[in-house]
Amino acid sequence: MDNIILFDDPAIRGSLLPFTFTRPVAEIRVGIQKISEKWGRYTGEAPGFLTQDYLSAKFTKKEGPAIMVNGAVCPSPELWKKIKELKKGQALYQHNILLATFVEQSASFHPEMAKSLSVLDFEEDLTIIQKNWHIFQFNGKELRNDFRLLTSGKTSQPNPDRHSILYNESNIFIESGAKIKAAVLNAEAGPIYIGKNTEIQEGALIRGPFALCEGSTVNMGAKMRGDTTIGPHCKVGGEVSNSVIFGFSNKGHEGFLGNAVLGEWCNIGADSNNSNLKNNYAPVKIWDYTKGGFTNTGLQFCGLMMGDHSKCGINTMFNTGTVVGVGANIFGDGFPRNFIPSFAWGGASGFTTFQVRKFEEVAIAVMGRRGLEYNAVEKEIIQKVFELTRHYRIWDKEG
């Protein structure tokens, strides 16, 4: 049982773009942790990945016998118990979604193979991230689950700052190295998790459920509303509501981010805002890569989906349900279109292509500031994503 491999379900992966352009499905953060990190907590060791070929150099797996687990599925005690009971020739399903199966050779696995096996049904409640908006929609639920998982048997660090106010303090967990000064933390509606070596600056207002992951900062006077996760090594300010920021991304200034998901290495310019509600209160439609058009989310509130390495200049205004690909750079006045392809450069007045050579200059500088290298593996992934998304850049005559 020591070889757990999280596979990308082909029926799901496309609906999680642009985030799955640069990572396996299980590397999506929802709640406090990535899905892969949650599984690592249950299994006791880091799982492997069965993903797109161009991602496999970065996200590896062990060959041989393995329990194959759907990377879109968040673990639960009941599900883990059922998986451990799986025998050869059995597959665990919920409705028509394969949850897990045992295989002799992980390299030759495909989800369709499981249909010929003995099917076991799993009927307990599960969180399955099948659409990109599920990341923020189910974040509050998973945040509560992760809070229990991460804090069980542990003791919170005390907060010695007499100028901070903590409501329902038993529902607030502070890891070592965290600094909190003259802030208000209200955990009456849900837990608040403050990660290692984080900082909450003066005048910040935080309502649970909320997670601030390792090395991140909430800037002075910020307003953090519930169901929000700030991933590791981020800086946030202004107003953030029901949003997930994966990691190494900044929204450091005033402006509103709501019902939104930001990938890694993103930057939101000062006073930028996203709309999360249409003026006519109609359900929000957003770009769906699997159909090459817009799809109805069924949600009244849906804001911004921004892929890795994308950035926007000051005072950028994003319309309701905007999807931005990987490596885009958005600036200028007016509302840009609500589907912005990867490596787009511009805004409401039009776009040109952000060429890979120029993109890499920025990536090297941005990652270098965090002591990380834009290496050959990262470069190959970005080059592949540039090619995969070329046809969306309709302004590019070379496309």
Image (spheres, rainbow, N blue to C red):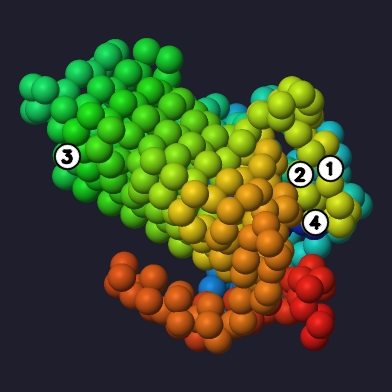
Is disc 2 placed on a helix, strand or loop?
strand
Residue at 49% in and 31% down: 241
In this orientation, which residue lies closer to the viewer: 241 or 53?
Answer: 241
**Label 4, label 2: how far apart the Cα atoms are:** 10 Å
Question: Are the residues at dot 3 and dot 2 in contact (C-beta closer than 8 Å)?
Answer: no
Question: Are the residues at dot 1 and dot 2 in contact (C-beta closer than 8 Å)?
Answer: yes
Above or below, 320 against 172 in this view is: below
**Label 1, label 3: how far apart the Cα atoms are:** 43 Å
Is disc 1 placed on a helix, strand or loop?
strand
From the top left corner, tell me how far across and down residue 95 is, in percent. Answer: 84, 34
Question: Are the residues at dot 4 and dot 2 in contact (C-beta closer than 8 Å)?
Answer: no
Q: Comparing marks 1 and 3, which lies closer to the viewer?
A: 1
Name the N-terminal-most of marks 3 and 2.
3
Q: Amino acid at mark 2?
A: Ile
Residue at 55% in and 60% down: 331
Q: Amino acid at mark 1?
A: Thr
Q: Comparing marks 3 and 2, which lies closer to the viewer?
A: 2
Please name the residue that numbered disc 1 is placed on.
Answer: 295
Kindly identify which numbered label has been placed on residue 286.
Answer: 2
Above or below, 77 against 378 in this view is: above
From the top left corner, tell me how far across and down residue 385 is, in percent. Answer: 67, 73
Kindly identify which numbered label has been placed on residue 179.
Answer: 3
Is disc 4 placed on a helix, strand or loop?
loop
Q: Comparing marks 4 and 2, which lies closer to the viewer?
A: 2
* Residue 118 in the figure: left or right of residue 336: right
**Label 1, label 2: how far apart the Cα atoms are:** 6 Å
Q: Amino acid at mark 4?
A: Tyr
* Residue 371 in the figure: left or right of residue 272: left
In this orientation, which residue lies closer to the viewer: 288 or 83?
Answer: 288
Q: Amino acid at mark 3?
A: Lys
